[in-house]
Image (cartoon, rainbow, N blue to C red):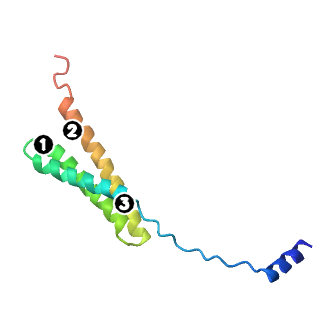
């Protein structure tokens, strides 16, 4: 009985086929502006502090700048899914390298080298 009712309803008012349209969700502009601002600030710090920043700090800031550039490229360049995955992995590796460099920098800067004496 219910199948007959459905057939009659479809004949009276057929359902319109809804095609799945790929949504054009783009990242918010405020996030992009924040990312660009952070990239600019990183370049500014690297330029102004090049005499005071040691090699470890300079490599940390350089890695951070490269990771942010890769993140910006990942958001705005139209690429295949495989390329997006590769860029995402590279960004995550860069962030892990930044954290490792920061930990090493903190250790070498604040470690107690006197060993109790």
Q: Is residue 82 left or right of residue 63?
A: right
Using the numbered discs, state the Cα–Cα distance from disc 2 to disc 1 in whole angstroms: 9 Å
Residue in the image at 27% along x and 57% along y: 36
* View extreme (top): residue: 117
Asked whether 53 or 112 is in front, the reply is: 53
Of helix, strand and loop, which one carries label 3?
A: helix
Local crowd size for mark 1, using a 10 Å CA cut-off: few (<14), some (14–19), many (≥20): few
Q: Closer to the observer: label 3 or label 2?
A: 3
Using the numbered discs, state the Cα–Cα distance from disc 1 to disc 3 in whole angstroms: 35 Å
Q: Closer to the observer: label 1 or label 3?
A: 3
Label at residue 105: 2
Disc 3: which residue: 29
Q: Are marks 1 and 3 in contact (CB under 8 Å)?
A: no
Of helix, strand and loop, which one carries label 1?
A: loop
Q: Earlier in the sequence, mark 3 or mark 2?
A: 3
Task: Find residue 82 and report its horizontal and vertical position in percent.
Answer: 42, 69
Q: Are marks 2 and 1 in contact (CB under 8 Å)?
A: yes
Q: Are marks 3 and 2 in contact (CB under 8 Å)?
A: no
As drawn, 105 above or below 113? below
Residue in the image at 38% along x and 72% along y: 79
Disc 1: which residue: 54
Task: Find residue 31 and report its horizontal and vertical position in percent.
Answer: 36, 55
Query: From the image, which quarter does the N terminus lie in?
Result: bottom right
């Amino acid at each position: 009985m219910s199948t007959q009712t459905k057939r009659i309803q479809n004949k009276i008012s057929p359902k319109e086929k809804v095609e799945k349209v790929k949504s054009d969700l783009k990242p918010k502009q405020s996030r992009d502006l924040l990312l660009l601002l952070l990239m600019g600030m990183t370049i500014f710090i690297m330029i102004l502090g090049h005499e005071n920043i040691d090699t470890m700090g300079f490599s940390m800031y350089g890695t951070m700048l490269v990771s942010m550039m890769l993140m910006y490229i990942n958001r705005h360049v139209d690429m295949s899914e495989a390329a997006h995955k590769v860029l995402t992995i590279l960004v995550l590796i860069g962030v892990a390298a930044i954290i490792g460099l920061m930990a090493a920098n903190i250790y070498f800067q604040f470690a107690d080298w006197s060993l109790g004496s």
